[in-house]
Structure formats: C-alpha cells, structure tokens
Amino acid sequence: MSTLASGPRFRRLNAHFGAEVTGVDLAADLDPATIAELRAAWLEHQVLLFPGQHLDPAESAAILKILYDRTARLENVIQYHWREGDGALWDNRAVWHRRVADNDPSEIRVIHRVQLRGTRPVGAGDSNSVGAGVGVGVGVGVGVA
C-alpha cells in the first residue's frame, strides 16, 4: 500500500504556492488513485514537499520519472522551430519549457520575458488557482546571416 492509514494530507505552505504532503510513503508502490491525487496537488500547489521520506537515489528517480513521463508525452509537447521574425507567447504558469539547441550557432536569438501584474490567475477548471500574477513569456527569434 502506498499511503498510510489516512491517505495523503496536504498543508498549504503560503498564500502563493507550495504544500507539505504527509500520509504517503514514497518508497512504497504508489497506487493509481494516490498518483492521481499527488498529480492534482502538484498542479494546484506547484511545489510539493514530502518531509520524513527516506528514499535512496533510485527510489527518488522513480518518483520523478512518474511525474516526468506524464508531462513528456507527445500529446503534451510542442517543439517550435524558430524562423527570423517569429514570436511566441506562452503562460509560464501552465508550461514547462526548455531550450533545445536547434538553431545555427552563428545566428543570434533574442528572448524577452515580460511579467504582467494582475488579479490572481485562474487555471482551467479551477477558480481558486494560486499565484500573484500572470506570467507571460515572449520569445522573438532574430536570424542574422
């Protein structure tokens, strides 16, 4: 069994993000219901802390793999191939992004980041989404011959 008798419990760490999770033994096999509950909490709180866990490196890697495998599925991934003059907007609250070395090293790429202040953001289907403002990343690719 992956949870203790009462199952996972979540305690918000502050007004913006983060929760402490108790009632889960991460070294045990996690059943699908527990994984779903942890995933939902991760989306809500953005950061989860699991105090008192005694995981060896392999066990820790297995937990991260469960979370990563979901986000790295092809239906959740877009790879954009920049061209001169391109621009892109994305919501940093909902996107895990990374740079791929897919451009010619002789080209210059200029990236600008903009953060908007506003009311508390609301996630899809969640009227109580957390966060202090809406983050928007803006990337502009500039090709130089």
Image: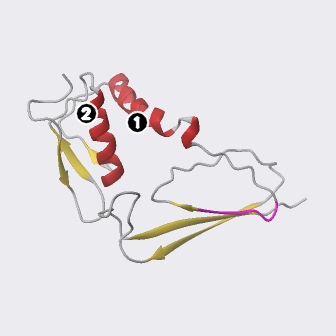
Quarter of the picture holding the N terminus: top left
User: Disc 2 or disc 1, which is closer to the eye?
Assistant: 2
Q: Quadrant of residue 84?
A: bottom right
Residue 51 appears left or right of 59:
left
Q: Is residue 19 above or below residue 51?
A: below
Residue 84 appears left or right of 16:
right
Could you tell me residue 47's position as x and y percent? 33, 50
Q: Amino acid at mark 1?
A: Leu
Residue 42 appears left or right of 20:
right
- Which residue in the structure is indicated by mark 2? 34
Looking at this view, name the residue that lies furthest to the front: 125
Q: Residue at x 51, y 49 (%)?
A: 96
Q: Is residue 78 magenta?
A: no
Question: Tag 1's secondary structure?
Answer: helix
Could you tell me residue 118's position as x and y percent? 42, 77
Could you tell me residue 22's position as x and y percent? 16, 40
Q: Residue at x 49, y 75 (%)?
A: 116
Please give the range of residues in magenta.
84-89
Assess disc 1: are there few (<14), some (14-19) or many (≥20) residues with their C-alpha within 10 Å of its C-alpha.
some
Q: Is residue 133 above or below residue 63?
A: below
Looking at marks 2 and 1 on the same chain, the residue that comes earlier in the sequence is marked by 2
Question: Tag 2's secondary structure?
Answer: helix
- Which residue in the structure is indicated by mark 1? 67
Depth order, front residue of 105/136: 136
Quarter of the picture holding the C terminus: bottom right
Q: Residue at x 23, y 62 (%)?
A: 14
